[in-house]
Amino acid sequence: MVGLGIDNTYTIERMRTLILHPEYEGEAYEWWIAYPHPLPEGMGVEDNETLLSTERDLIFCQAEAGTYHLRLEIHDEYNPINHSFTIVVFDEEVAYSPYISRVFEYNPAPGQFVNVEIAGKFLRKLGLLPAYRMSHEGYAAINKNRETFDAAGQALCDGETLMLFPEADHQDKRWLGNFKIGYLRIAFEAAEKFNFERDVMILPSCNHYSNYFHARTDMLIKFGQPISLKPYYEQYKESPRETMIQINQIVRDKIQEMMLHIDDLNHYEQIDFLRDNGYGRKYAIEHGFKFRYLPSRLISDQKLVSALERAYKQHPEQMEQSYSDTSRLIEGQRELKIRDWLFIHNPGIEAPLLRGLGLLLLLPLFLVSALPTLLLFVIPKIFLKKLIKDQMFYSSFNVGVSVFVSVPLCHLLPSALLWIFAGHWWALGYFVAFPLMFILAWNFIRMFLKFVGSCRFVAPKNKAKITELSKLRKSVFDRLDKIIEQL
């Protein structure tokens, strides 16, 4: 037994789940499984392992009968534990029905389509390799990652550059998740093929977005200093896993320094609202940063988030009240369906009148540009939302839909037909005007949304609520200023 929680052997029926929970409290957890299954004759369990999970609990479920060799490693400074055990999976007594009894929501991942023969060949030609995750493709599929690791390692040996996301997962918030060590396994295996004579470098990088989902927003790619693996070769030969864990922490720390990382997830919504709206704008301007210039704003946001998290540690009661009032402010704006920028500009009745006039003047042009915009962006997104529940995959699939369907049908085909039937000038005009139509439609919709927001802001029925929210907003900002000044 390990911490009175994990046995040496388990026996379960095929397709049944086994939840493993170590009672021992450690600093970190790693669950490993020997790959491939079953083990070839003469191969030891630890000769070729795959990391299953770094969570404390492991949910094990297998479709194929057989004996599975697993290992739990609990990291602890004073009492580390390394425990190997087996799970015997046997066939069910009564065969499962081959027919569908219930339909669940389908949540595909892009890696699944690399296995489709035509799409897979095309994506692999582009240098895209699939990564299989238990949360999307299922437990049985993760063994296929060995093929990806081998192909990636060969690319390094051929002198190519390999780009991957070490989190092996994603989320739609501004914080850095836990890193898997698969990328280091690939790197060290490539170095080993050259007898550790060549230096393999890890280049930390991060992607920063002004907005994850909106069109025509800014993106910033940052690169850190390369980390050489050569100084760690001898250490790796003696203790490979411990060496990779050590380097993995170094890489993660370097990337976290470059990105916007909100560590206080209990108050994430409030912190993100403050830094993305009026208070973040105010903080940036007062500290000499450019709020509209993403590289400058990233530094400002990093400093603001750090200040808010330090303030919470030093003044928890005051900050808890500030976050509570911020939540009230967020809910109040949602209730009225307005945005925080309206409190910054405080528009009068003339603002919606001028915007309304501009919308009327631009309406004919918008109607002309609306159809291609609908076909290229709006309609595909509606279908993708019904097909895919994870919004972080929308862009990945939308690129594929645009390349293979939308752009050929809406841009290239009409241009070709105009060339044939109306002449090359008409074709050239449409070809150039097509992307401009989307920009016009996007700006028109943006103006319309601001028009609606301004109308709600100046509406007499909302006057009392707007005044209340304005006072609450000023109270939150003033209190935060005083707390941060004391740091």
Image (cartoon, rainbow, N blue to C red):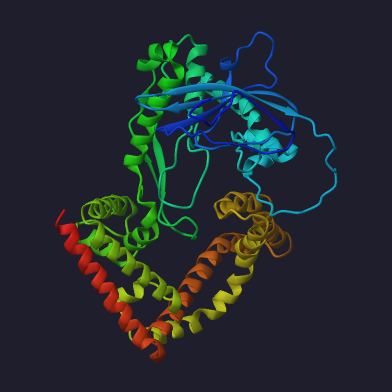
- Quadrant of res 428: bottom right
Q: Is residue 435 left or right of residue 426?
A: left
What count of labels does the image hold?
0
The residue at the point 25 percent across, 60 percent down is 317
Residue 478 appears in which quarter of the rendering? bottom left
Percent across and percent down for residue 475 are 24, 72
Task: Tell me if residue 383 can be seen.
Answer: yes
- Please give the name of the residue rendered at 38% of the width and 31% of the height, measured from the top-left corner: 249
Give the answer, above or below, for where 40 lies relative to 121: above
Please say whether residue 349 is visible from this viewpoint. no
Residue occupying the point 52% across, 18% down: 157
Pick whichever, 55 or 481, lies toward us: 55
> Residue 50 location in percent, x, y?
57, 26
Q: Determine the residue located farthest toward the left in the rendered image.
A: 486
> What residue appears at the point 45 percent right and 32 percent down from the top-left corner?
24
Picture coordinates of residue 161 (x, y %)?
49, 28
In front: 320, or 161?
320
Where residue 271 sits, quadrant-wise, is bottom left
Tell me residue 42's x, y (percent). 65, 8
Taking the view exactly as shown, the residue that stands out farthest to the bottom is 460
In the image, residue 234 above or below residue 327: above
Position of 19 relative to 366 (above/below): above
- Relative horizontal placement of residue 346, taking residue 355 as reference (left or right): left
Q: Is residue 48 left or right of residue 79?
A: right
On screen, residue 397 versus residue 91, left or right, reads left
